[in-house]
Image (cartoon, grey):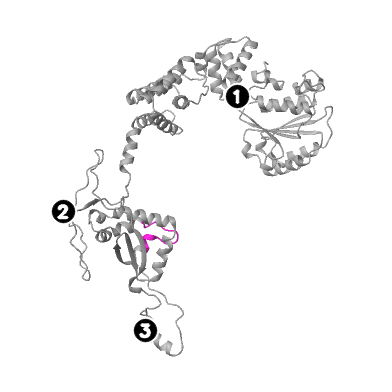
Amino acid sequence: MAEVFYRKWRPKSLSEVVGQEAITKTLKQAVTQGRVAHAYLFCGTRGTGKTSTARIMAKAINCMSPRDGEPDNECHICVGINESRALDLIEIDAASNRGIDDIRDLSDKVRFSPNEARFKIYIIDEVHMLTEPAFNALLKTLEEPPAHAVFILATTEAHKVPLTIISRCQRFDFRRIPIEQMVAKLGDICAQEGIEASHGALQLVSRIANGGLRDAENLLEQVFVSYGSTIDEDDVRQLLKLGGDEMALELVGHIVGKSVSEGIAAINSTSEQGNDLRQLLRGTLEYLRSLLLIKTGAGAQFGYSDEVAERLNTLAADTQMEHLYRVLKVFAGVNMRRDTASTLPLELAMVESAMQPERAVVAAVAAPRREAAPQAAPPPPRYAPPPASPPPNSQPYRQPPRQSQPQPPPRPTRVAAEAPAGAPASMNGELPAQPAARLEHQWRTITWALRHVGTRFMLGALLNSCKEREVADDTIVLKFAHRSNMERIQEELDNPESRRAMDDAVVKAMGGSFRIKVSLVNGGNSAGTQSASQRSHLVLAAQAMGARIVSEKEDEQR
């Protein structure tokens, strides 16, 4: 049986590891200077060379005649490791051997001396899969390792490895392999295997692999088996069903040009041809991201052909950064998990991406404004429904003047108000211009808006117990009959969130900002006021016999 590409062309020396020059240089120096650590942690995404580097390190540490920190691959130790028959190299899959018993067995065996090499090398792959008790057992071994043991831990999810383990290892983070280096490696494999692959085909394979060389080698072998020794870009697209990429580029052109009808037609054409709409979305997002990087001057390498790169540069020059940012957010939020065959999510995204600037203007116009004094409402925009006419025979509410302090007649100016969604219908109508009259007219609106606001007590319920309300300049004084209600609402107003909600409700109802103060009605049931219970003949008789009042239960309104 033929050996697969990723095993056949696995690197055998540190210099052959692709895209990890900084790591391999450090490891070479460690071997050359004899400063090999007792534990290493290799982190990185799949296919970036973690396990291969661990195997090379096992050879370099035990090699009989190393050369500049590299194994010679000729001594019996290196040959044994290359042929997977070395007894002193123990590879453990933590996904299958993740329990505490497995690690205890390892801890027992690690005490034995190596069979023929100088060091016993333990490679634990996917170490993040170990259980918490297993990590605790491994920790003890890493704290006091025998002199003849070296541990190399590999993981794709370093955040799941306990910090106590990481702190006892030398950590190396393997990066994704750049496209150019991956293309060069695939080109070398093609030359060794007698494959004629176009540069565009290798670029496409490298781009799809997303930084993982093993995935790229597997894709290359799959295309080679399917189409023979001559491979071009169309073969890769046909095998991987990437026919929607060209349509994705066309769709991006319609998105940038805000051509809604052409964009929807392109989406439906892709669906009718039987192409995967999810691939169309992925391709669209990839091209939009490339436009963003081009627009920002990031200078990233995309691995596109010259024709596609020129097209993207033209589109980037024709679009604005603000529009590009908006459409990227719109298409990134498309969810096609439930129905992968439906074109509706992409069609809605196409329409929304073209309408987004106008919607932003609408949101800015519709935002509530805070003003110092009430002003006439602006005329409704053309897209809003006409305001509802007041019911017949309805008269605007007018606050009667007080007897003790007559007020001047209210000005004829009226400000139109609209009740919040779900509010009682009685809250609708015209608002008086005088602040005091307006407060009385809008009081139900304020209490209704605060009915669910409060940390310990609901503000709406407490405000319903307010007996009198006065407006003096920029201050609203709320008067309560019972001290307990006043203290409760003061406690809520001392909370920043409740205070902010109260201020917002007052601003919306009154058209301006007011300070809120609370007090008792004519002193209320304060210490200097005798309550009705204290004037009772039973209480007076009890006091005459030497009794005293300890507490008084108030008749509160809820």
**What is the residue that sits farthest to the bottom in this orientation?**
545
Comparing 305 with 273, the one in front is 305
Mark 1 and mark 2 residues within 8 Å of each other at the beta carbon: no
Q: Which residues are magenta?
A: 450-462
Give the side of residue 41 with respect to residue 442, left or right. Answer: right
Q: Which residue is mark 1?
A: 177
Q: Which residue is mark 3?
A: 536
Mark 3 and mark 1 residues within 8 Å of each other at the beta carbon: no
Q: How many marks?
A: 3
The residue sitting at 37% across, 23% down in the picture is: 254
Amino acid type, label 1: Ile
Dot 2: within a 10 Å radius of its alpha carbon, few (fewer than 14), some, or many (20 or more) residues?
Answer: few
Give the side of residue 151 with respect to residue 546, left or right. Answer: right
The residue sitting at 69% across, 40% down in the picture is: 167
What secondary structure is the stretch in magenta mostly built from?
loop
**Element at badge 3?**
loop
Q: Which residue is mark 2?
A: 392
Q: Position of residue 216 (x, y in %)?
A: 59, 21
**What is the residue that sits farthest to the left in this orientation?**
393
Mark-to-mark CA distance, 3 and 1? 91 Å
Q: Position of residue 336 (x, y in %)?
A: 44, 32
Q: Quadrant where the N terminus lies? A: top right
Comparing 347 with 431, the one in front is 431
Amino acid type, label 3: Ser
| Whether residue 488 is situated above or below residue 57 in the rendered picture | below
Q: Quadrant where the C terminus lies? A: bottom left
Dot 3: within a 10 Å radius of its alpha carbon, few (fewer than 14), some, or many (20 or more) residues?
Answer: few
The residue sitting at 83% across, 31% down in the picture is: 114
Q: Image quadrant of residue 449?
A: bottom left
